[in-house]
Image (cartoon, helix red, strand yellow):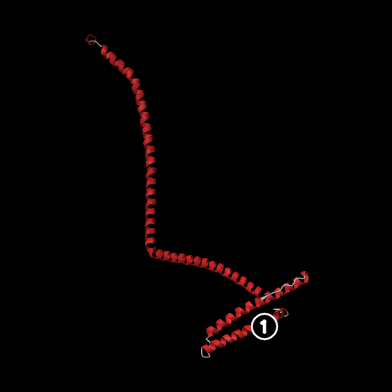
Amino acid sequence: MIFMADLPASELEQLGTVFLDKKMAARIERLSLENGGFVAEGDELALRAEREEQKRIMMCAVHMYWHSVQVASRSTDERGQRLYLTPAHFLRMFHYHERLLREKKNDMDGQIEKYNSGLQRLRDTQNLIHEYHMTLSEKEPELIARLDHIQRVVSEIEEEFERIKKKREDLKQTAHTVEGKANTAKEIKTKCETTVNKIVPSLNQAINSIDQIDKQDLA
């Protein structure tokens, strides 16, 4: 650890890269021996992807280690206290990093599950809309026939309404004429009653006079 603290970050990365390359070559050679001198393309691609992932982890570790060395150096200069870094510190950091990644992965899995659930609901809704559309397409002739029937009924109702309206106007006119005739008859009745009232006294007098005539007056 003390020897590596004297190396710059670039050389630490180079050293880690050499180590990873040797490790990868050994694994490819072992797979080649197991498969009779042949390595499947899928296995080789998987190993290369794993190697790239390990290289990113290694570079992250190098940067963390180099910055930790700088922090330790500043602590020595500012406080006079030497910080000693051991592999346990980095293993602990990787452990925390792994736990954080696992928590993030669980969160992402939860979000992905929610998204998948939402997508499934959208698919179900889309299927229902498609089924509804197909049902409407099948019932379109029947719906058109019903619509035509409703339009005919509405047209008949409008025509009947116009006839009733006209009859109503005729009845109003007839009622007005009847009312006029009734008023005329009432006036005639009133005149007749007035005339009769005038004649009745004279008629009564004539009747009384007739009743008073004696046979001797006639002789």
Q: Nearer the viewer, residue 177 or 109?
A: 109
- Image quadrant in which you'd find residue 128: bottom left
Q: How many marks?
A: 1
Q: Nearer the viewer, residue 51 or 65?
A: 65
Q: Is residue 60 left or right of residue 195?
A: right
Above or below for 166 versus 70: above
Specify the quadrant that holds the N terminus: bottom right
- Image quadrant in which you'd find residue 2: bottom right
What residue is pinned by disc 1? 15
Q: Nearer the viewer, residue 115 or 58?
A: 58
Disc 1 marks a residue whose amino acid type is: Leu
Residue at 64% over, 78% down: 58
Q: Is residue 150 left or right of residue 89?
A: left
Position of residue 14 measured from the top left corner of the image (x, y, whole percent): 67, 83
Hey, which residue is sitting farthest top in the picture? 216
Above or below for 168 versus 116: above
Specify the quadrant that holds the C terminus: top left
The secondary structure type at the circle numbered 1 is: helix
Residue at 39% over, 48% down: 161
Hey, which residue is sitting farthest bottom in the picture? 37
Q: Is residue 12 left or right of residue 78?
A: left
Other-residue count near label 1 (Cα within 10 Å), few / some / many at <14 / 14–19 / ≥20? few
- Image quadrant in which you'd find residue 186: top left
Position of residue 149 measured from the top left corner of the image (x, y, whole percent): 37, 57
Q: Nearer the viewer, residue 179 or 8?
A: 8
Position of residue 52 measured from the top left corner of the image (x, y, whole percent): 60, 80
Above or below for 138 versus 202: below
